[in-house]
Image (cartoon, helix red, strand yellow):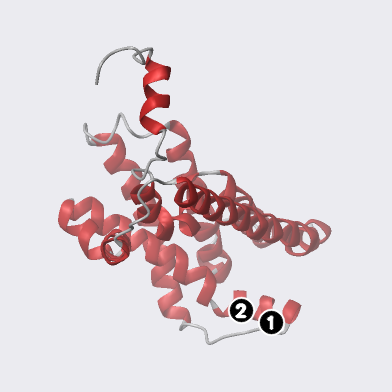
Amino acid sequence: MDTWLELARGPFFLFAITFMILGLARHVILTCWELFRTYYRAGDKIIPYAQVARNTWQWLLPIYKIKERPLYGLTTVTFHISIIVTPILLGGHIALIRRGTGLGWPAIPNVLADILTVVAVLAALALILQRALKSDSRPAGKFKDYVILCLIAVPFASGFLVMHPALNPFPFDATLLIHVMSANLILILIPVTKISHCALAPLSQIVSELAWHWPPDAGSKLAVTLGKENEPV
């Protein structure tokens, strides 16, 4: 078990974090490249950057999501805050990063970390139930979306048990291995699933805006595609 733990916290973690960083960087670079290409080919190069900035801010600001669907929006915002803040600002994680890289930053109190961990698990379960039980959102949810939410809950639930051995009914080493390996799996899944929106969300509104700035010959090419090139305009 000790060997597996060392592998999980060493080479496996290094591979997972490197895969995540390179994968997200690839998404961002390719998206930015396509944005430049679209802008270069656009017939109308007048972009309302102020409006795009406002739309981006409204898209990212949690309060707007809460207004649209209060319960689901509040659950989503709570879920995102807890799964982002807890792993980044947990003292134990920071100590591991500092040991490996020499870098570190202030940690949140352990009590707050415990609260956010429980919130993350409960919010994941709440999102699953809300998506499954609500008729208007059920068709949009795919099986893999539910699987991802369950997988995200695993490292938080196992991490809580690791931090509180008195509440843990399972062997400590096995729980720790599940915690580390499930976290590594999430890191690998981030750039290859819709979780990649964590890096692409700030670009969503400029992508949407530029999508309507077609090249000058777009109309004729569309007519050819539709077989309407000989019809009068």
Q: CA distance from mark 2 to mark 1?
A: 6 Å
User: Can residue 203 be seen at all in this image of the molecule?
Assistant: yes
Observer-nearest of 60 and 107: 60
Label tally: 2
Q: Which residue shows up at 38% across the image and 66% down it?
A: 81
Q: Which residue shows up at 59% across the image and 56% down it?
A: 29
Task: Judge from the rendering whether residue 195 lies leftward or rightward of residue 81; answer left or right.
Answer: right
Q: Are marks 2 and 1 in contact (CB under 8 Å)?
A: yes
User: Can residue 175 be seen at all in this image of the molecule?
Assistant: no
Label 1 sits on a secondary structure element that is: helix
Q: Amino acid at mark 2?
A: Ile
Observer-nearest of 19 and 170: 19
Query: What crowding class fits label 2: few (fewer than 14 Cα within 10 Å), some (14-19), or many (20 or more)?
Result: some
Q: Which residue shows up at 35% across the image and 49% down it?
A: 44
Relative to 78, does residue 113 appear above or below in the rendering? below
Residue 60: image location, x then y, percent: 33, 62
Observer-nearest of 134 and 169: 134
- Quarter of the figure with residue 24: bottom right
Residue 71: image location, x then y, percent: 20, 53
Residue 101: image location, x then y, percent: 73, 79
- Residue behind mark 1: 98
- Residue behind mark 2: 94
Observer-nearest of 1 and 37: 37
Query: What crowding class fits label 1: few (fewer than 14 Cα within 10 Å), some (14-19), or many (20 or more)?
Result: few
Q: Amino acid at mark 1?
A: Arg
Check the picture and name the quadrant holding the N terminus.
Answer: bottom right
Check the picture and name the quadrant holding the C terminus.
Answer: top left
Label 2 sits on a secondary structure element that is: helix
